[in-house]
Image (tube, rainbow, N blue to C red):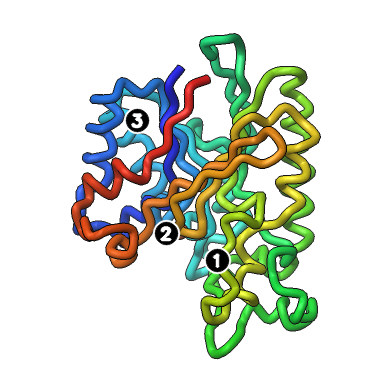
């Protein structure tokens, strides 16, 4: 079974480029058996769900996704609370929140589980106190979740809830190999180098090591994440960690001189696994 991995499509920010159409064509051409999207499809939950459905139809293969922090944003909590948005995702058949997908791999059954994950500040430099990190603001910059996500009132509590939910799902997989998907980073290998201004602070909001430690206790073979807009893959303790982020078109230039050649960028971003 051939599965494609990608994250951070940001279809609204990248709207000048036919990202969904190009992605669907590649999946068809390569005869993918499914696509896993590790969050940040758009900044509107309705759009994210609609685009996932369209992508599945156009690519003619199943699409599974977890929401990213952008997919969870609300600019009016009275109208759309963070918990309501999360509940809407849980009800979407393509979203991995509150579900386990049982796949028929080439060598036997494989489980697919996932959720957003969250952050617990464990990736920040220890130069900063918990109180400073709770501000989610540093050097005149504010992490946007602070303004657009109500969970930021208790980030570490939310991370613990996510770890507990994922643990339950992982336990239900028994001895089967597992593909685990979060938007947030489970390992610090994908953090932004601390030399880049402000990131010794803002790495706090990229994920947490409790996710990676959780995976090591179960039969996770592949872990997929996004969020940090890198395109990387590392192997740690028998688990292959994938970070396949398309990112914003304004960032594409830094990946290569191909710049705004969307087809090249999408092809280069996709990672593939055989299960
Ligand atoms: Fe993103």
Residue 192, numbered circle:
1
Is tag 1's residue or tag 2's residue first in the polypeptide sequence?
2
Decide: is 159 above or below 63. below
SS for tag 2?
loop
Ligand 1 image position (quadrant):
bottom left
SS for tag 1?
loop
Decide: is 129 above or below 209. below
Q: Position of residue 174 (x, y in %)?
A: 77, 20
The residues tagged by marks 3 and 1 sit, at their Cα atoms, a distance apart of 32 Å
Decide: is 84 above or below 202. above
Name the residue nearer the viewer: 125 or 102.
125
Residue lying at 75% horizontally and 80% vertically, measured from the top left: 128
Is residue 120 visible in the rendered structure shown here? yes
Q: Are marks 3 and 1 in contact (CB under 8 Å)?
A: no
Q: Are marks 1 and 2 in contact (CB under 8 Å)?
A: no
The residue identified by callout 3 is 56
Does the beta carbon at disc 2 come under 8 Å from ligand 1?
no
Residue lying at 69% horizontally and 18% vertically, measured from the top left: 176
Name the residue nearer the viewer: 92 or 96.
96
Is tag 3's residue or tag 1's residue first in the polypeptide sequence?
3
Q: Position of residue 258 (x, y in %)?
A: 21, 56
Decide: is 220 above or below 153. above
Name the residue nearer the viewer: 6 or 255.
255
Asked if residue 36 lies left or right of residue 203, the reply is: left
Crowd band around label 2 with a 10 angstrom C-alpha radius: few (<14), some (14–19), many (20+): many
The residue identified by callout 2 is 43
SS for tag 3?
helix
Indicate which label's residue lies in the foreground, 1 or 2: 1
Residue lying at 29% horizontally and 67% vertically, measured from the top left: 250
The residues tagged by marks 2 and 3 sit, at their Cα atoms, a distance apart of 19 Å
Residue 167 in which image quadrant: top right
């Amino acid at each position: 079974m051939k599965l494609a991995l990608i994250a951070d499509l940001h279809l609204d920010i990248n709207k000048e480029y036919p990202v969904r159409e190009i992605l669907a064509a590649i999946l068809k051409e390569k005869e993918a058996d499914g696509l896993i999207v590790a969050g940040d499809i758009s900044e509107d939950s309705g759009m994210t769900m609609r685009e996932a459905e369209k992508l599945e139809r156009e690519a003619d293969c199943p699409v599974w996704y977890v929401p990213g922090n952008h997919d969870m944003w609300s600019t009016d909590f009275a109208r759309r609370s963070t918990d309501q948005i999360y509940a809407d995702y849980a009800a979407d058949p393509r979203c991995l929140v509150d579900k386990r997908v049982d796949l028929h791999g080439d060598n036997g059954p494989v489980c697919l589980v996932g959720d957003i994950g969250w952050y617990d500040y464990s990736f920040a430099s220890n130069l900063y106190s918990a109180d400073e990190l709770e501000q989610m603001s540093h050097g005149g910059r504010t992490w946007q979740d602070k303004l657009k996500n109500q969970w930021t009132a208790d980030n570490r509590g939310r991370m613990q809830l996510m770890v507990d939910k994922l643990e339950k799902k992982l336990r239900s997989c028994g001895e089967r190999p597992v593909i685990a998907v979060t938007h947030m980073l489970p390992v610090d290998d994908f953090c932004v180098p601390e030399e880049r201004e402000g990131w010794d602070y803002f790495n706090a909001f990229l994920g947490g090591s409790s996710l990676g430690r959780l995976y090591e206790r179960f039969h996770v073979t592949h872990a997929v994440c996004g969020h940090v807009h890198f395109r990387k893959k590392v192997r740690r303790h028998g688990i292959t960690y994938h970070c396949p982020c398309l990112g914003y078109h304004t960032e594409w230039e830094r990946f290569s001189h191909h710049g705004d050649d969307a087809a090249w960028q999408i092809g280069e971003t996709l990672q593939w696994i055989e299960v």
